Amino acid sequence: IAQVVARYEALRVRFQATDGGLRAILNSADAFEIEQEDLRHLGSENALETAFKRAQEFCAQVNLIEGDWLTRAKVFALPGGESVGVISSAHMIADAGTRNIVIDEIHDILDHGAPRAVAAGSYNDYALAEREFLAGPQGEALIAHWRDWYHAQPTVKAPSDAAPLLWGN
């Protein structure tokens, strides 16, 4: 879990309220703490059942947007050297796609010793590349295409009174 959190800045971000907005701050990967709970004293079946119940409770906790960490993790030690790991992130920084990447990478680390996929680029790098593309001739053509398409669409009208349904700011 710690290796995956270290690979992705989005999982280490936190927000701080500033003059009317939020400022993103990147936490150090070394500062990420994984909670631990030892359930080895319980029988195998009871330990697993207890771990799943507590994992659900752990994931049901709210990750406050102004908290120190928007990603939290916990590992439950089970009898026989087994364990259950759980990771929870605020939806603002991680969605279902992120969840799938995290799960795949944890499986890769456990099965192969390291992630097999190349780490995704940072969102900031993506945004800068997108901005550069849109500022160039191909971006201008793309923007012009979608503006023309939008203006060519008929006005949608309400079925009840035919009032125009306008979309905008």
Image: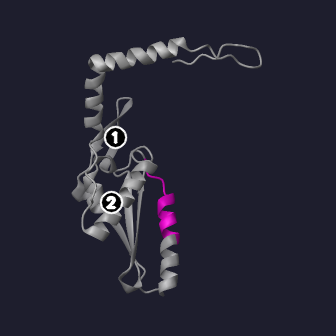
Residue 97 is left or right of residue 5, and the answer is: right
User: Quadrant location of residue 88?
Assistant: bottom left
Please say whether residue 3 is one of the residues in the magenta stretch: no
Identify the residue at horizontal 44%, vertical 52% (top origin): 63
Check disc 2 and give the amino acid type: Glu
Q: Which residue is mark 2?
A: 105
Q: Nearer the viewer, mark 1 or mark 2?
A: 2
Q: Is 111 above or below relative to 15?
A: below
Please report whichever mark, 1 or 2, sits nearer to the chain's N-terminal start.
1
| Quarter of the image with the N terminus in it | bottom left
Identify the residue at horizontal 36%, vertical 57% (top origin): 102
User: Quadrant location of residue 20?
Assistant: top left
Q: CA distance from mark 1 to mark 2?
A: 29 Å
Identify the residue at horizontal 53%, vertical 12% (top origin): 152
Q: Which residue is mark 1?
A: 16
Q: Which residues are magenta?
A: 53-64
Q: Is 32 above or below relative to 130?
A: below
User: Quadrant location of residue 128?
Assistant: top left
Numbered disc 2: secondary structure: helix
Please say whether residue 57 is one of the residues in the magenta stretch: yes
